[in-house]
């Protein structure tokens, strides 16, 4: 299928913004993660335009203090409507973390000798997000209590089996399933892809909540963090860790902290006092960063991901 003329638009993220730091975080410092690929200069990912798929390639054309990104949409089978372009722009803005300001986090971190280097090392990293809250929740459920590699394999199987797909320059790309795509799946279907019984049940249950309209991202956006937490904790498969991860990766809230995360406890503890922290110790230490604890969380995860690949 031959694509029509590429469409280009510009994004101007809130400064300070480091495109390379954000693209590396998105791809887990491996150059590829899920639908995202980064070659050191260009971040690319397929985007959902409603009834078709296009490839978005993103490059930096600005600086950290005056950021500018050029986005090119290509491979689409027909001319793009204004609505489709707006939809693509919204997706890209979320994925690259165009909005937000980490500077208040830096101002706090520079007063803590053990953590000041962390803020400097990943300077310009924002709160990158998944394309939708549904995708964030489903990814979180699939990744519970298993290794990152196994979780990635489950996501790939689910995406390839249930996601909308499209051909771009002769290559087939699958997008993460929409709620309707998974709401009709059976537990047996998902178990055949490697999901446990509970994860299959939770995934279908969440999909049905979104597909029916009982749960929507718009309804949660208007709520304060504690109300979002209260509402989501009523759903099967969602605990406190998942809620705080969703506040960060799904809603872009600046003050969430998944205190039960063992990797966070270990990494922050080693930086501050040379040994892993308990959840309560993590909460106490992170309290200095209110109301910007999401940035502390993301910067610690950046360090964790970079260490895993030998990037630092």
Image (cartoon, rainbow, N blue to C red):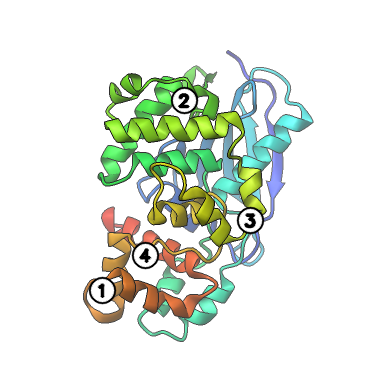
Pinpoint residue 132: horizontal percent, then vertical percent. 56, 41
The image shows residue 43, relative to residue 260, as above or below, that is above
Element type where label 4 sits in the image: loop
Element type where label 1 sits in the image: helix
Disc 2 marks which residue?
182
Q: Nearer the viewer, mark 3 or mark 4?
A: 3
Crowding at mark 1 (Cα within 10 Å: few <14, some 14-19, many 20+): some
Question: Are discs 3 and 1 less than 8 Å apart at CB?
Answer: no
Pinpoint residue 68: horizontal percent, then vertical percent. 66, 54
Question: Are discs 2 and 1 less than 8 Å apart at CB?
Answer: no
Question: Are discs 3 and 2 less than 8 Å apart at CB?
Answer: no
Disc nearer the start of the sequence (2/4): 2
Disc 1 marks which residue?
270
Q: Distance between the Cα atoms at labels 4 and 1? A: 15 Å
Element type where label 3 sits in the image: loop
Q: Which mark is residue 223?
A: 3
Disc 4 marks which residue?
259
Disc nearer the start of the sequence (2/1): 2
Q: Which mark is residue 32?
A: none
Q: Nearer the viewer, residue 275 or 212?
A: 212
Disc nearer the start of the sequence (3/1): 3
Please count the marks in the image: 4
Pinpoint residue 180: horizontal percent, then vertical percent. 54, 24
Q: Distance between the Cα atoms at labels 3 and 1? A: 35 Å
Q: Nearer the viewer, mark 3 or mark 1?
A: 3
Query: In this view, which residue lies farthest toward the top?
Result: 1
Question: Are discs 2 and 4 less than 8 Å apart at CB?
Answer: no
């Amino acid at each position: 299928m031959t694509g029509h003329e590429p469409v280009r638009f510009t994004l101007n993220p809130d400064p300070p913004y480091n495109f390379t730091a954000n693209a590396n975080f998105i791809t887990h410092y491996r150059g590829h993660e899920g639908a995202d690929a980064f070659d050191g200069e260009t971040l690319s990912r397929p985007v959902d335009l409603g009834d078709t798929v296009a490839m978005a390639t993103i490059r930096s054309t600005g600086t950290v203090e005056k950021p500018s990104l050029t986005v090119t949409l290509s491979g689409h089978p027909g001319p793009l409507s204004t609505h489709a372009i707006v939809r693509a722009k919204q997706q890209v803005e979320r994925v690259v973390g165009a909005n937000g300001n980490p500077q208040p986090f830096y101002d706090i971190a520079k007063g803590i000798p053990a953590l000041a280097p962390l803020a400097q090392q990943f300077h310009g990293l924002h709160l990158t997000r998944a394309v939708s809250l549904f995708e964030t929740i489903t990814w979180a459920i699939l990744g519970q209590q298993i290794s990152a590699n196994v979780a990635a394999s489950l996501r790939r199987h689910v995406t390839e089996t249930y996601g909308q797909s499209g051909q771009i320059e002769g290559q087939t790309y699958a997008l993460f399933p929409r709620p309707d795509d998974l709401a009709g799946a059976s537990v047996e279907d998902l178990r055949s892809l490697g999901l446990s019984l509970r994860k299959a049940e939770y995934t279908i249950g969440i999909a049905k909540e979104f597909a029916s309209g009982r749960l929507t991202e718009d309804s949660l956006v208007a709520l304060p963090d504690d109300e979002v937490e209260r509402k989501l904790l009523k759903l099967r498969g969602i605990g406190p860790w998942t809620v705080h991860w969703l506040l960060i990766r799904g809603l872009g809230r600046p003050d969430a902290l998944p205190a039960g995360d063992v990797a966070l406890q270990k990494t922050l503890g080693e930086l501050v006092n040379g040994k892993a922290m308990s959840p309560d110790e993590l909460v106490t230490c992170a309290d200095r960063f209110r109301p910007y604890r999401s940035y502390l969380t993301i910067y610690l995860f950046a360090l964790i991901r970079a260490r895993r690949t030998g990037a630092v």
